[in-house]
Amino acid sequence: MKPEERIQAAVVLAVIVALNGLLIWRMHELLMQPGFGPYWRVFERELHLAGYDPLTYLTVTDWDVFFEVHRHPLLAFLVWPLWLLNEGLTALTGINCVQLVVALPVVFCSFYSYIFLYRIHREVIGLGRCDATLLTAFGFSFAYILLSVIVPDHFTISMFLLLTTLYISGRCLQKGRMFRWWQSALLFFLTAGVTLSNGAKIFLAGLFVNGRAFFRLKYLLLAVLLPAALLWGVAIWEHRVFVQPREQARAEQKVRKAQAEEELVARMTPDEKERYEAKKARREVVLRRQAAKTGKPMEDHGYLKWTDITTSRWKTLYENLLGEGIQFHRDHFLEDTLVGRPVFVTYRWTLSYVVEVLVVLLALAGVWFGRRSRFLWLCLSWLGLDMFIHLVLGFGINEVQIMSPHYLFVLPIATGSLLRAYGARWLRVVVLVLTLFLLAYNGWLLTDFLLSPIQATV
């Protein structure tokens, strides 16, 4: 830790630890039970944090490959040491310590995400200490970046890896250095292993840093093709060994359940059949509502089954991607789209849309003033990749705000280019007011949620 970072680092670490402590306090009676118990049911029904999956908690509690292996090929194995630690703690204490164990990497990655974002502003963009601190706080005041510091999912890990890559890339561009093939290969293997689509960002970083040297045969073979082939091989092996047997067992169980249900219906009285059909109809209505929220995919199989061609792009942009991602909606707060939250929720106040417009205008002005910066264009290429995935293909578009840790940090970085080129006092005041407002508004809603007792449904 550098001397100039120590005071703010201590404050940030204290806040991150406090927020994680509040989440643990809120959920511990449900999650930190003795023995194994019906954890899948508990995690699925009770841990609703805006659509973030509870798969990390489940994997650390009872290790298996629960993640989608073609999108997160290494994630289960990166979590495996945490499962070992939890097994040891459970043996010593008699309770499931999953929340405490998962909080360790979440706190670490959140904290160093803040540090690397500060260093990007300070060392790469070249801002003064006050401006760098202001813009880093500005970025972490965004709703879903603030939320990511407590969610037991892979997004804060991805944000840490991406900001680490950006910092290294920025320093290389400053000093005229190139990415060595092994550096790029290692960053790709880890980053894509956590979230496959982010692996493309490592290739973009190599392209912007190395320039034409990126296309040299040695670099393409060792830094691009080799790690990509290795990771794909891991995903295929993982699917065959861990996923296929479970899918086959689930399919067989489904057949047996259907047969048993047919036999049960055959023995029902007319009144019982009527109640059964009514219950079945209600369940089908719920399933149709959920299907309507996910939109229509381009294809019903392969990777295209995760696309969406029907959900409104324009409303997604201002209500979710740049809306909910930056400012929480008070209505349906942190609800899951696939459970009860509508795809689109409107703000109660016009002020919320004004804040959103100001944040975007600051970033756009930064793009103009920093248009000659190779580093800024690297950041924008990452943002463009995410916008293509979410807004063009429609991947995850119905809950795109949860992807915010993958791309929203580009906005304060772009604003940093504005402050460096045109550092008027009134501009700093605008950023400061926005930061204080977002920290107060998002922070109040989040802490109020964490301090409220959970109402168990199981």
Image (cartoon, rainbow, N blue to C red):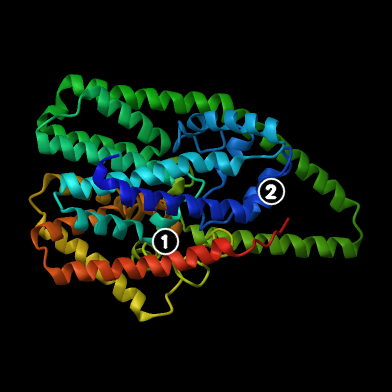
- Specify few, some or many for label 1: CA neighbours under 10 Å numbering under 14, 14-19, or 20 or more: some
Contact (Cβ within 8 Å) of mark 1 with mark 2: no
Q: In this rendering, would 340 be left or right of 157?
A: right
Q: In this rendering, would 3 be left or right of 196?
A: left
Judging depth in this view, the residue of 147 and 345 nearest the camera is: 147
| First in sequence: mark 1 vs mark 2 | 2
Q: Is residue 330 visible?
A: yes
Q: Residue at x 19, y 48 (%)?
A: 122
**137 w.r.t. 123: above or below:** below
Judging depth in this view, the residue of 442 and 19 nearest the camera is: 19
- Amino acid found under the numbered disc labelled 1: Thr
Residue 7 at x, y percent in the picture: 32, 50
Q: CA distance from mark 1 to mark 2?
A: 31 Å
Label of residue 310 in the image: 1
Q: Determine whether the residue tagged by mark 2 lies in a helix, strand or loop.
A: helix
Q: Residue at x 29, y 60 (%)?
A: 138
Q: Is residue 159 visible?
A: no
- Give the mark toward the camera: 1 or 2: 2
Q: Quadrant of the C terminus?
A: bottom right
Residue 145 at x, y percent in the picture: 39, 55
- Specify few, some or many for label 2: CA neighbours under 10 Å numbering under 14, 14-19, or 20 or more: few
Would you name the residue on which mark 2 appears? 41
Judging depth in this view, the residue of 367 and 221 nearest the camera is: 367
Q: Residue at x 37, y 31 (%)?
A: 190
Judging depth in this view, the residue of 393 and 183 nearest the camera is: 183
Q: In this rendering, would 17 be left or right of 86?
A: left
